[in-house]
Image (tube, rainbow, N blue to C red):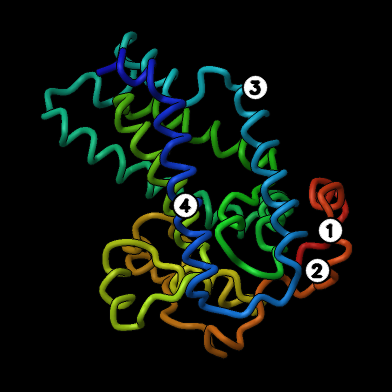
């Protein structure tokens, strides 16, 4: 299993990335949820540029990344799951749930702690929301997120296959729940019992602060309900809600250099 993961990790991740990205991009074009207010071309240049910068920096600073750490932890018997007798698939599923819970708390922290918010607000300055918004994160936030994930891997001794599944899942659901796609409300009500849907997550990108500070989940929707951060619908409805942050409304200023410098330049809200 480990040999297969090492040999095929990059192909699996890229394969799922492009398959989901292309599918969501076509769906957005054929059946969009909202009318976009800003230039899609300009936004895509910025968002995809950030995506490639993030990927490059992660490979440069963390060449072994999360899967490499999981393999070392397994070899050295680090972490809880490497020291207890438990069914392999039960360990894998539990690890994925713990990863997702960690991402939820991390997301809450990045909204609550001013220093972290300066990084995370790069994600929220997008004036529209579509499939590319799911990868619009400041490189320093991506590095911090990877460091947190690696710490959790060492702590719990997560198997490498669960790390790979979670990273593919997180990447895929992020593109899905940020997509500007229309899903029937009746279907959405059922889907959001199992996964964070675009309508559920879109509330989180509202310019209204109490809505921004809700629906923190990325993969699974249960944490928001358990910790009472769930909001069913935006107050103004999905068609009329305003996306973004109140202090950053000038699309012409939201260039790539400005976005990368934003944590040093921008006001908190």
Q: Nearer the viewer's eye, disc 2 or disc 4? A: 2
Residue at left offset 20%, top offset 33%: 91
Distance between the alpha carbons at the discs numbered 2 and 4: 26 Å
Distance between the alpha carbons at the discs numbered 3 and 1: 26 Å
> Mark 4, residues whose alpha carbon is within 10 Å: few (<14), some, or many (≥20)?
some
Residue receiving disc 4: 105
Whether pointer 2 and pointer 3 mark residues with C-beta atoms closer than 8 Å, the reply is no
Whether residue 28 sits left or right of residue 43 in the image: it is left
Q: Is residue 39 above or below residue 149?
A: below
> From this viewpoint, is residue 191 visible?
yes
Q: Position of residue 73 (x, y in %)?
A: 36, 16
SS under mark 4: helix
Whether pointer 3 and pointer 1 mark residues with C-beta atoms closer than 8 Å, the reply is no
Toward the viewer: 27 or 263? Answer: 27
Q: Position of residue 267 (x, y in %)?
A: 83, 62
Toward the viewer: 247 or 227? Answer: 247
In primary-sequence order, the first of circles 2 and 4 is 4
Q: Nearer the viewer's eye, disc 3 or disc 1? A: 3
SS under mark 3: helix
Residue at left offset 44%, top offset 50%: 20
Residue at left offset 32%, top offset 23%: 79
Residue receiving disc 3: 61
In primary-sequence order, the first of circles 2 and 1 is 2
Whether pointer 2 and pointer 1 mark residues with C-beta atoms closer than 8 Å, the reply is yes
Distance between the alpha carbons at the discs numbered 2 and 3: 31 Å
Residue 12 sits in which quadrant? top left
Residue receiving disc 2: 248
Q: Position of residue 166 (x, y in %)?
A: 37, 40
In primary-sequence order, the first of circles 3 and 1 is 3
SS under mark 2: loop
Whether pointer 2 and pointer 4 mark residues with C-beta atoms closer than 8 Å, the reply is no
């Amino acid at each position: 299993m480990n040999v297969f993961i090492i040999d095929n990790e990059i192909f699996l991740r890229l394969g799922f990335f492009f398959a989901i990205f292309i599918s969501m991009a076509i769906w957005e074009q054929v059946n969009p949820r909202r009318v976009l207010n800003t230039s899609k071309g300009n936004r895509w240049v910025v968002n995809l540029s950030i995506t490639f910068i993030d990927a490059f920096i992660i490979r440069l600073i963390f060449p072994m990344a999360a899967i490499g750490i999981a393999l070392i932890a397994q070899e050295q018997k680090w972490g809880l799951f490497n020291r207890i007798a438990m069914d392999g698939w039960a360990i894998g599923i539990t690890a994925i749930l713990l990863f997702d819970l960690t991402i939820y708390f991390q997301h809450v922290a990045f909204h609550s702690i001013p220093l972290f918010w300066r990084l995370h607000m790069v994600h929220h300055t997008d004036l529209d929301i579509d499939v590319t918004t799911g990868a619009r994160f400041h490189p320093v936030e991506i590095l911090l997120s990877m460091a947190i994930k690696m710490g959790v891997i060492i702590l719990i001794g997560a198997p490498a296959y669960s790390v790979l599944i979670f990273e593919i899942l997180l990447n895929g659901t992020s593109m899905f729940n940020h997509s500007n796609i229309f899903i029937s409300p009746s279907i959405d009500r059922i889907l959001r019992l199992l996964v964070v849907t675009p309508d559920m997550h879109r509330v989180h990108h509202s310019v209204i602060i109490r809505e921004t500070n809700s629906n923190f989940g990325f993969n699974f929707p249960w944490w928001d309900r358990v910790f009472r951060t769930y909001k069913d619908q935006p107050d103004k409805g999905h068609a009329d809600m305003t996306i973004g942050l109140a202090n950053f409304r000038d699309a012409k200023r939201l260039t790539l250099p400005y976005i990368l410098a934003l944590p040093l330049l921008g006001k908190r809200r």
